[in-house]
Amino acid sequence: AMELWQVPLLFSRLPMFPFFDLAHYVASVMALKEQRGAVEVSVRSPVACWFSAMLYCFGGSVLSSLMLAEPPVAFLAKGTNILLASSVWYLVFYCPQDIFYRCFAFLPLRLLVAGMKEVTRTWKITAGVAHADSHFKDAWFVMVAVGWARGAGGGLISNFEQLVRGVWKPETNELLKMS
């Protein structure tokens, strides 16, 4: 029998890749589904819905790549992450009787996923700063801007995502009213 004090130690030894990334994808795709018109787009054009979901999940990578003059589609090279995010997208939008969405909409699970997503956000900010540092040594403003873009990219790129879904309104610009 395992004692209670050993549980955190056991948890710290687990490979964290799928768990925290999965939580990020679940929170991001659920946020997309709760946007006005997203369910209708998923029925009318699944490819546009999938693309919107990938922008929600990987918006930080796209935006930081654009800021560093790198290909914005570089995130597509991570096949495992794309497959995982696509699986979450499929389950959130097309699971029979909305079971997957309803399960994660349950408040305790939603809070757990939100907390795990914030852990992922800190990793993304750190990765963005390190990535900018590899291109621009001692350029603190660039490092902060790229870290910010990598961490908050899903919200910052939401105007383009809304344009893909056909529901864009200029007054919804995240830069004008930051959360």
Image (cartoon, helix red, strand yellow):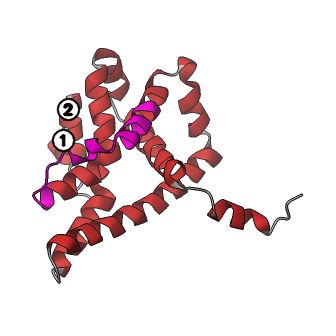
**Most frequent secondary structure within the magenta stretch:** helix
Q: Residues within 10 Å of mark 1 (few under 14, many from 20)?
A: some
Q: Which residues are magenta?
A: 66-87
Q: Nearer the viewer, residue 173 or 136?
A: 136
Is residue 62 found left or right of 69 in the rendered image? right
Task: Please give the name of the residue rendered at 47% of the width and 30% of the height, measured from the top-left corner.
Answer: 92
Q: Compared with residue 147, is residue 85 higher up or lower down, i.e. above or below?
A: above
Q: Is residue 30 magenta?
A: no
Q: Compared with residue 3, is residue 70 higher up or lower down, i.e. above or below?
A: above
The three-letter amino acid code for the residue at tag 1 is: Phe
Q: Residues within 10 Å of mark 2 (few under 14, many from 20)?
A: some
Q: Is residue 76 magenta?
A: yes
Q: Nearer the viewer, residue 17 or 88?
A: 17
Q: Nearer the viewer, residue 86 or 53?
A: 86
Q: Quadrant of the N terminus?
A: bottom right
Q: Which residue is mark 1?
A: 160
Name the secondary structure under disc 1. Answer: helix
The outermost residue toward the left is 69
Q: Compared with residue 49, is residue 128 higher up or lower down, i.e. above or below?
A: below
Q: Give percent across and percent down for residue 110.
A: 57, 46
Q: Nearer the viewer, residue 40 or 139?
A: 139
The three-letter amino acid code for the residue at tag 2 is: Val
Residue 64 location, quadrant:
bottom left
Residue 109 location, quadrant:
top right
Q: Quadrant of the C terminus?
A: bottom left
Q: Which residue is mark 2?
A: 164
Dots 1 and 2: beta carbons under 8 Å? yes
Q: Give percent across and percent down for residue 11.
A: 66, 60
One can see residue 34 in this view: no
